[in-house]
Amino acid sequence: MVRVLAFSDIHNDWTTLRALLQEEADCYICAGDLTYNEKGIKEAYEIMRPYLDKIYIVPGNNETPEKIAALFPNYVHGRVLECEELRIGGIGGTKTTPWHSAFDWEEEYAYRILERLGETDIFVSHCPPAGTTLARTVDGRDVGSDAIRWYIDTYQPEYAVVAHVHERAGVVEKIGKTTAINAGRKGKLLILGNEEPL
């Protein structure tokens, strides 16, 4: 069995980040937004540095790919890496909004990244998939991505870890064979190789 602790949207809550990293896990997955802006990335890095070989990360919409890639060796935006023989890969950022975040994209960009990504066991995306409860804001808007939904529908990873919509933290939804979760700031422990469902 492999213990994977997934979390997202820490937004400078360093007390919570330290507590999450005290949880015993074979690998830690961060689905983005460690900070509200890029000033906090170095601070997050210093906290996470003792665990770098176990941390698999994509940037959120408040972080640029360049800054995260420069500090975290297991950066999985647009690539697949292995942890305990599990393939972990994903995409950071979110689809374009009127607020123009540090890292947002058009759907065509996401499709290009995801078509090259191929199969994963754990798919990590800061942006949630369209047409799911994971993508619904408190006012009912669907802020999910069609490209993310296409990837999950097509490749059916065992887990999809998503983020971004804070009010959906802790929500779990099945998309075909995939268990999609918004781990949120409190985090979610996944046990792979366990016959019990999440």
Image (tube, rainbow, N blue to C red):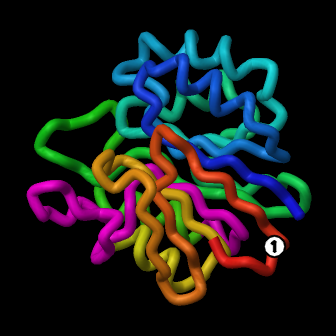
Q: 32 or 15: which is nearer to us?
A: 15
- Quarter of the figure that contains the C terminus: bottom right
Q: Is residue 169 left or right of residue 113?
A: left
Q: 142 or 167: which is nearer to us?
A: 167
185 shown above or below 22: below
Q: Residue 146: where, in percent of width, then height?
A: 33, 72
Amino acid on which disc 1 is placed: Asn
Q: 118 or 38: which is nearer to us?
A: 38
Q: Is residue 70 left or right of residue 109?
A: right
Q: Main secondary structure of the magenta part?
A: loop
Q: Residue 24: where, in percent of width, then height?
A: 81, 39
Q: Is residue 117 left or right of residue 3?
A: left
| Quarter of image, res 47 | top right
Residue 105 is at least partly visible in this image: no
Name the residue located 57 percent from the left edge and 29 percent from the top edge: 68
Name the residue located 64 percent from the left edge and 18 percent from the top edge: 45
- Quarter of the figure that contains the N terminus: bottom right
Q: Residue 40: where, in percent of width, then height?
A: 46, 14
116 shown above or below 155: above
Residue lying furthest bottom in this view? 176
Is 121 colored magenta in this rendering?
yes
Residue 4 is at least partly visible in this image: yes
Q: Is residue 1 left or right of residue 111?
A: right
128 shown above or below 42: below
- Give the residues drawn in magenta, as a range: 116-145
- Which type of secondary structure does the marked residue at label 1 adopt? loop
Name the residue located 49 percent from the left edge and 55 percent from the top edge: 125
Q: Residue 150: where, in percent of width, then height?
A: 44, 79
**Residue identifier under label 1:** 194
| Quarter of image, res 29 | top right
Residue lying furthest front in this view? 196
Is 57 colored magenta in this rendering?
no
